[in-house]
Image: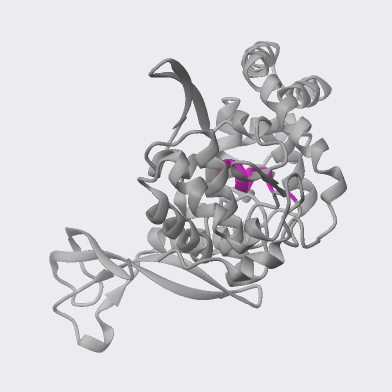
Amino acid sequence: MKDRLIESIELNCPLCGDTHRVEKRLRETQALFKGEIVDYEEVYFLCDRADDEENEFVPAKVMDSNLLKVRDSYRIAKGLLASYEIAEIRSYYRLTQSEFAAMLGWGEVTVTRYESKTIQDETYDSLMRMVRENSMLALEYLDKHRERFTDKRYSEIRQTVKNRLDVSSPMYLKMQEIKSMYTKFEEASDYNGFKSLDIEKLTTIMGYYASEVNHLYKVKMMKLLWYTDALYYKRYGKSMTGLVYVHMTYGALPIGFNEILSVPTIQVVEEMMYEDIGYKIVPTSKVDESIFSKEELSVLELVAGKFKNYRSKQIVDYMHEEKAYIETSDHELIPFSLARELKELS
């Protein structure tokens, strides 16, 4: 999608001065923000009665929305939460913008600014991420700043957080377990594709494949992850997830392969397969693909398209022919440098 029609609407056109139907359109473009070029999708209007050279206009509200997209693209590029992700975190606990700020001990309008125009610093960003991942921490911050709420509202919020705690605590502990497995791979190396483990990116990728790929079981998911990281490394010199892979009988398996099946974007469902039980992977929700860069999405689409209808054995056999598998031994870590010889997936 480079430029497409969203809808045709009737309004008073500021270019020709008449009330008539104009096209509301969306296009991919770039903007300079904080000295850097960022890609974003811009909404604009097209008047067919104005001069060809001056036939576009953007109303003030739409301009604000476009500018927010620019800021969000910048934030994502810097590894920060986008405005809509901040809104999702506070909505998770059913908080208003001022209540979320109060819970965290910030100024009343801090979150409002983060969701509209201000770019948060890494410290504030990390805290918002942590309270989303760990409801116990959210509860601690709520109790710490209890005086900023009425008794009634404090009790309501506390109950909501406690309800989330029952759901999120096992997940949080599992994520911490995964992180602990990767403590010795924190430094960039040939074995993690020169990238530290990015659980959030991993979680989103697994949700993407659960939505896009057929016949998806544990073995196949692990191969999709390896091909994702290997292809991204071949193209851009680094892994996408930071997973570390081991040479095993069924091909490359990431360290912690059983644990990562607990990520919240997927669910493992038991399924009878003849006399055996299979563990099919299904999505828990639709993944927002806008969080991926163009480069990342290109890799994901290519891997998904190539292996969409492969059965587990087929993708295992395919991986067994890769130089990365042939030139490593059982239980040996697979260096990403071998991914430079990856077979073409097209």
Please give the name of the residue rendered at 67% of the width and 11% of the height, measured from the top-left corner.
155
Give the residues in magenta.
197-204
Confirm whether the magenta stretch covers residue 224: no
How far from the left and from the top, in percent, is residue 342?
56, 66
Q: Look at 73% across and 51% down and name the residue there.
A: 329
Could you say which is closer to the camera, residue 299 or residue 316? 316
Quarter assignment of residue 326: bottom right
x, y (%) of residue 284? 46, 29
In which image quadrant can residue 5 be found?
bottom left
> Is 144 left or right of 279, judged from the image as shown?
right
How many discs mark residues in the rendered view?
0
| Residue at 72%, 60% in the rendered image | 193
The N terminus sits in image quarter: bottom left
Q: Position of residue 53 (x, y in %)?
A: 26, 88
| Residue appearing at x 47%, y 44% in the figure | 208
User: Where is residue 47 shown, x and y percent of the image?
Assistant: 19, 74
Magenta: main secondary structure equals helix
Can I make out residue 84 in this image? no
Q: Is residue 315 above or below residue 51?
A: above
Residue 199 lies within the magenta run: yes
